[in-house]
Image (cartoon, rainbow, N blue to C red):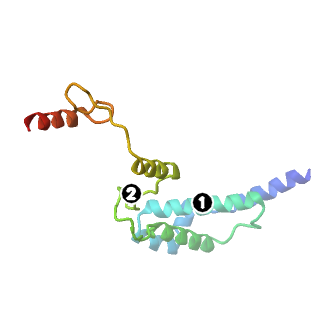
Amino acid sequence: MSPGGARRNGERGKLRAIPSVESLLQTPSLTELGGRVPRSVVVGAARETLAALRDSIRRGTQASAPSVETLAAETRRRAEQSLTPSLKPVINATGIILHTHLGRATLPEAAIAAVTDAARWYRKSIWRAANAAPAWPIWSRSFASSWARRRSSS
């Protein structure tokens, strides 16, 4: 038998020694946990634990399958960790809260430069000579018509 074949046979033996998800769920530790948290959480944690073990055996970093109690403890840790809230409180010091509740997003430098340039210099306005109302591309039509009405009523 080639060295690679012997290694694969040894790997298969180690993988076969891994307990099933159901037998892992039957341990007293996980049975008790299953009474407090949804079964789907415990099953998902058991699947993650066993998948991580399989990966470490295939990579050669795990010499053999640990005991069922050790796997149950790891599964319990994963299940409890998944139930721990991951959101952390933050302080919104911008004065404006966006729908993400994380505060205002910063402006890119190009946008800041454009705002600064627009505020610093005079801008040319286009006016219609006939009624002295601002032309459409610069101001909206509704503003132009309301401005013209106020102008004509005075």
Residue at position x 53%, y 71% from top? 76
Q: Which residue is mark 1?
A: 20
**Numbered-mark total:** 2
Residue at position x 29%, y 30% from top? 136
Based on the displayed image, in which of its 4 quarters is residue 97 positioned?
Answer: bottom left
Depicted 11 relative to depicted 153: above or below: below
Residue at position x 76%, y 58% from top? 59
Question: In terms of depth relative to the viewer, which is nearer, 73 or 124?
Answer: 124
First reached walking from the N terminus: tag 2 or tag 1:
1
Residue at position x 28%, y 36% from top? 139
Q: Dot 1: what SS?
A: loop
Depicted 133 relative to depicted 58: above or below: above
Q: Is residue 16 visible?
A: no
Question: Residue 36 location, x and y as percent?
Answer: 40, 71
Question: In terms of depth relative to the viewer, which is nearer, 135 or 16?
Answer: 135
Q: Which residue is mark 2?
A: 100
User: Residue type at mark 1?
Assistant: Ser
Between the C-alphas of marks 2 and 1, the distance is: 41 Å
Question: Residue 18 location, x and y as percent?
Answer: 66, 62
Q: Name the front one of labels 2 and 1.
A: 2
Neighbours of disc 2 within 10 Å: few (<14), some (14-19), many (20+): few
Side (left or right) of 105 relative to 52: left
Side (left or right) of 37 relative to 18: left
